[in-house]
Amino acid sequence: MKELIAKAKELLMNKEVDLLIGYQSAGEKKAKPLLIKNPDDADKLVFNEYCLSNLVTYLNRPDIKALSKVAVVAKGCDIRAIVVLLSENQLVREKIFIIGMTCDHVMSPDGTEENIKCSYCKVRNPHLADVVIGAPIDERISKETVVRHEDIEEFNKKTKEEKWNFWKEELSQCIRCYACRQVCPLCYCERCIVDFNNPQWIDTRSNPRGNFAWNIVRALHLSGRCIDCGECERVCPANIPLMLLNRSLQEEAKDKFDWEAGFDPEAQPPLTTFRKEDDEEFIR
Amino acid sequence: MAEQYIDYDKAKEMLGNLTKNSEIEVFGPVKKGNDTFISKLNQNSELSFDYFITVNSIKEALLPRFEPILKYRINHNGVTLEDLPPVKPLVVFGGRPCDASSLPLMKKLFNWDFKDEFYLERLKKVIIITIACDEMDENCFCTSVGGSPRNETGSDVLLERVCSTGWKAKAISEKGKNFLKENSNFFNAKLTPEKGYPKIAEKDIPVVFDSKKIKTWIENNFESPLWEEFGANCLSCAACTFVCPTCHCFDITDDASMWKGVRTKNWDACTLPYFTKHASGHNPRSQSYQRYRQRISHKYSYYIDLFGQVSCTGCGRCSRVCEAGVNILDILKRIDKEATKGGK
Ligand code: SF4
Ligand code: SF4
Ligand code: SF4
Ligand code: SF4
Ligand code: SF4
C-alpha cells in the first residue's frame, strides 16, 4: 500500500497525470473507486481483496477522456480491458499510466469466498503496465490452459425449451437500468443501439421482448471482446446471471477462433478482421 | 376488535389465496440470490419474510416499469382506439415504512398539472400492507426526513414484528380495516410476543442532517465544485433511480406496425446520459456529476418548492444498489456540514 500511495503522490505532485483512479475503503470488507486530483488525497488509497471494481471503465467517460493523462490502478484482469480498448483504438497508450497490481485473488461480490474468475486467472502478474506494484505471485495455471466452466456445461445439458424458460424467467426481471452497460469497460459506444429512437431498433420496454432484445444485443456486442471481469453481473440490481451468457460466448470464441480477449495488444480481434481463407460456412 | 396477529404460515397462505384470484394483482417479497425483491406473485412464487429491506421498492406495483397508455387500430374507416385492460385491485405486502411514505408524495406529483389516471386509479385500489422495520443499516436515514421505522404514512395496514415468525397487525386506514375484517381468518394466529422485539426503535436512527439547511445550500451552490466531488464516481446508470420509491420520471414510446400500435409509459431516469439530450445534439447535463446534482436537487430543493416536501424517504436503496460507491447519505451529511460552516 505504501508503495502505491508513494507512486500516486509522485505522479500527481509532478503533474505527470491530471487524475488518478484507484480504490478507497468503503467500510469493513468493502472498497469503492477513488478519483483524485490532489496528491494529499492519495493517503486514502487502498488495495485489497475487496477491490472488485474494474476501474478501466472510467477511462471511457467523456470528461476523463478529455484529460491529457490519467493514471489507473488495475489488476491483471482489468488490464485485459485496457488491451482490448487499445486494440480497438479507444485509448491512446501515452495518455494513460497503468499502475499494475499483482493480485492473488479478490472476493466474490458478497464477500464470502474467492471470486470464481480468480480460480482460473492467467494474469496475477500484470501483463501490461507502466509500473508494477506488489510482490510477484505464482500463477496457478499456464497461459495455454483452455478454461471450461462447469456451470455452462451443466446449463448446456438443458433442452432448448428449458433454456428458453430459464432465460425468460431471468430476463423478465431486467429493469433496463443499463447498469451493466455503464459499468462495462467495453461498452463505450457514444450512442448505444438501445438509445436510438428514430428508428427505434430495440424495444425499450422492460417486457420479455424488449429485455431479450436488449440482453442478447449486449452479449453479442461483447462476444470475442468480453474480458470476463464480471462487473456487469456484480452491478445488476436484478441479480441476473449475466456471466452465464458472457462466459458461453467466451468459450465459443475460444473454440471457433482460438481467441481470448485482452492478452495480446498486437493481436487482431476475430470480429474486426477479415481473412480470405475463412470458410464462412455459416453464410448461405 | 381484539388484537390481530399473523404468522409466516398464515401470511403465505393468505397471499397464496389472493394470488389465485385473477381479478387482483398481488405483490410480495421474493428471494433471489442473497437479496429479496418486491415482485408480482404467481402460484410458484417462493415468499420470503426474513429480509432486512428489499432491493427494489413498492413503486414496482404502482408505477409499473412499462405500462400501455393507448392502443389503436387503423382500418379503412380510420383510427379506432382500443380498450386498455382495466386497472385491477392490488395488494402489496412487505414494503417498509420508507416505501409506503412515498405514496402521498407521489400522489402530489401525479395529481398536479396533469392527472395521471393510471397512477391515481392504482392508488385508489391498492392495499398497502407494510412491515415495520426490525433492522437497519448504515444507509438508513428515515428519521432525518420525517420518517421512522414505525411510520404509518401511506400504509393501510402496519405489521409489527412480535416474534421471529410473526407480526401484530394494525389497521391504519378504512381500507386497511376492511382488509383485516375480510381476511380475519388469517389474522387470527396465536402468537406470544417474545422479548427483544421489535429490535430497533426510532432513537436507533439518529437525525443526521437538517433538510432545510440542505435546501438553502442547494439553492445557493449550483456551481459549487463540491458537486463534482459528489458525483465523481457516478457511471450514469439508472439503478439508483429505478429502485428509489420516489423517483418517477418516465418516457413515452410508440410501438407500431402498419395497422396497429401501442403507446407505452416506461421508466426513465435523470441519471442516464440521454435524459436531457436535445435533438440539436446539445446536452445541458452532459456530465455525470451534473446529472447526479439534478437527482439530489430535485429531491431536496425543487420538490419542496412544488409540493412542500422533500421527495426522499431515507430508505437508502440508492446507496445500497450503487456499485460505484455513490452514497446519498454521505453527500447529504457533507452538505449539512458545509451549510453549517458557511452559514448560508
Ligand atoms: S460484458 Fe461484463 S464481464 Fe464482460 S467486459 Fe463487460 S462488464 Fe466485464
Ligand atoms: S444491469 Fe441487470 S437489470 Fe440493469 S439493464 Fe442490465 S441486465 Fe437489466
Ligand atoms: S449514482 Fe450509482 S447507481 Fe446512480 S447512476 Fe450513478 S453509478 Fe448508477
Ligand atoms: S433518494 Fe435514495 S434514500 Fe431517498 S428515497 Fe430514493 S432511494 Fe431512498
Ligand atoms: S428527475 Fe431524476 S431524480 Fe427526479 S424524479 Fe426524475 S428520475 Fe428521479
Image (cartoon, rainbow, N blue to C red):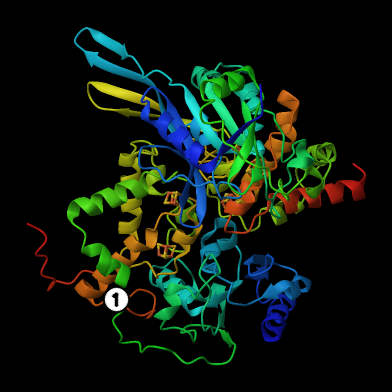
Q: Quadrant of residue A73?
A: bottom right
Q: Quadrant of residue A157?
A: bottom left
- Residue B269: x, y in percent? 54, 40
- Residue B313: x, y in percent? 69, 38
Residue at x-position 69% and y-position 74% = A45
Per the image, the residue denoted by label 1 is A148
Q: Quadrant of residue B343?
A: top right
Residue at x-position 69% and y-position 51% = B136
Q: Quick check: A241 above or below B343?
A: below
Which of B128 and B196 lies nearest the eye of the viewer? B196
Q: Quick check: A281 above or below A212?
A: below
Tell me: B173 left or right of B19: right
Which of A264 and B234 lies nearest the eye of the viewer? B234
Q: Residues within 10 Å of mark 1 (few under 14, many from 20)?
A: few
Residue at x-position 31% and y-position 73% = A149
Q: Residue furthest top?
A: B77
